[in-house]
Amino acid sequence: MNQHSSQHRSHALNEYDVVIAGGGPTGLMLAGELALVGIDVAIVERRASQELEGSRGGGLHTRTIEVLDQRGIAERFIAQGTRHPVVHVHPMALDISDAPTRHPYTLGLWQNHTERTLADWVRELGVPILREREATGFVQDDDGVDVRLADGTALRAQYLVGCDGGRSAIRKAAGIAFPGWDATKSWLIAEVETAEEPQWGFREDAFGAHGIGKSGTDGVVRMVLTERELHADGEPNLRDVSAALVAIYGSDFGIHSPIWISRFTDMTRQAATYRDRRVLLAGDAAHVHPPVGGQGLNLGVQDAVNLGWKLARVIKRHAPERLLDTYHAERHAVGARVLRNTMAQVALSRVDERTKALSAVMVELLGADDARRRFAAEMAGLAIRYDAGEGHPLLGRRMPDLDLVTVGGPLRVYTLLHEAQPLLLDFDARRAIDIAPWADRVRRVDAHCDGPWRLPAIGEVPAPSAVLVRPDGYVAWVGEGTREGLEDALATWFGPPAANARVR
């Protein structure tokens, strides 16, 4: 087992600190976050292996790549993918190559590669993935959760996290409402072989846009087709794809040997709460929306990174349980904004003349550099600001990955976050900040930085004298020549000061 793995408990009684229902990208990322800091976690996954049918979830956005970089594993993904210096939105692709980040691009990488790479990482960390076992319900009490499995067995955990998709059994068992908007449009997506050369590229008609392209596998064609009538239920088959192709192109190009056929809609819903006492939701279990802009996988991975360190500190009793309430407060707001953006893009994709006129206006507006930078940062996950109060522009925003000079040599900020621990960076050599009461929980590093501090969509900001960085890479406190507010921020996020320790 990896040195980070918890080895203190026998699992003969099937007991864990955390059980995660669902081993997709969100569940895997959460498991890695917890295992890094010694939390005893297990994943329950109904699939027999990590393999996925079809080329779903086709990209990682900039902020997702950054959080992987914060854990030292970004290169594993980058080496497999293709960099595109744009984010895709309707009605245009937005250049992001000038964003102040080490990763100013979208990484083209299908979800099966992303999942497999995350699974390798959590395996290295010693996380058990209990395959062909599905969580169907639970009973929680003041001390923990009994997780019921489909095979009649059960697991015991202090906390249960539902990462089990849009039809989440955990969300339903918790009785958490899932309000939103019903579907108005549906699309077929298929990977098939064809007997004839298809008509490559995009086509638009009175019902919507359609596309046919190469899948990346020899002989296999990938197509996304807007359906003429809404079909929100039922599993589509080859006949459905054939009929849609004939209606759009006048031919089905002799499609055969389907690899994968699916359907998606513009249904948009969000869980009313992401937490019910000891049960939490993340990823598609907490929010569903159409896949325009490739937001879903990225949103779920970032849910996991927000939740993981908070859950770990509550379990270790380094912070009060109310810290978990900030997970809902922060991520529900981010999710709601993503849902709004995807709904807007679906509306802009309609092909009536009035919507085309609106799209043309949007193209003009987004052609202005300031608007382009702001919206590209929004789509790439770089514009998130959590509520950390008023003050310096850094407060609540992602910490930039600066090149630092330290007594141990040159270091990047994100290198200092590899162990998922909080970090105080002190840039004022004249009067060092003492955080003795939190020294067991927060790493303090004296550093110097010559370069400018630039934030996406904002630009250059004043260099602070110190910053307190949460394990997820967001700034919890900024020093501007004094330590005012530091003790409050430390106590809020990392628990009360240790007994018998004084701040000097």
Image: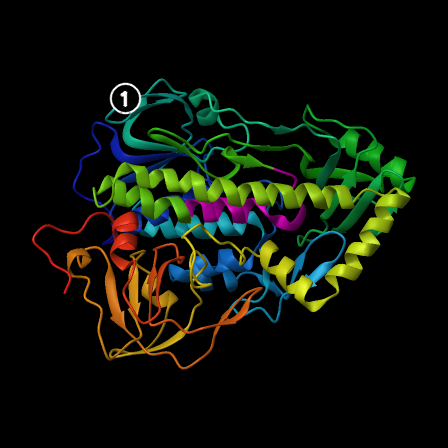
The quadrant of the image that shows the C terminus is bottom left
Query: Which residue occupies the extreme top position in the image?
Result: 152
Q: Amino acid at mark 1?
A: Asp
- Nearer the observer, 177 or 496: 496
Q: Residue at x 47, y 47 (%)?
A: 301
Q: Quadrant of residue 233?
A: top right
Query: Which residue occupies the extreme right position in the image?
Result: 250
Q: What is the span of residues highlighted in magenta in the rendered image?
A: 289-304
Query: Which residue occupies the extreme left position in the image?
Result: 500
Residue 177, given in percent of the width and then of the height, sits at 51, 24
- Nearer the observer, 101 or 197: 101
Residue 262, given in percent of the width and then of the height, sits at 67, 35
Residue wearing tag 1: 141
Q: Residue at x 27, y 21 (%)?
A: 141
Q: Residue at x 31, y 37 (%)?
A: 322
Is 347 left, or right, of 51 in this rendering? right
Q: Residue at x 32, y 52 (%)?
A: 124
Q: Label 1: state its secondary structure.
A: loop
- Nearer the observer, 196 or 278: 278
Residue 320, given in percent of the width and then of the height, sits at 25, 40
Mark 1 surroundings: few (<14), some (14-19) or many (≥20) residues within 10 A: few
Is 36 left, or right, of 95 in this rendering? left
Check the image and tell me how it is coloured. rainbow
Whether residue 197 is visible to the viewer of this picture, yes or no, is no
> How would you classify the magenta stretch by its main secondary structure?
helix
Residue 194, given in percent of the width and then of the height, sits at 79, 44
Query: Which residue occupies the extreme bottom position in the image?
Result: 450
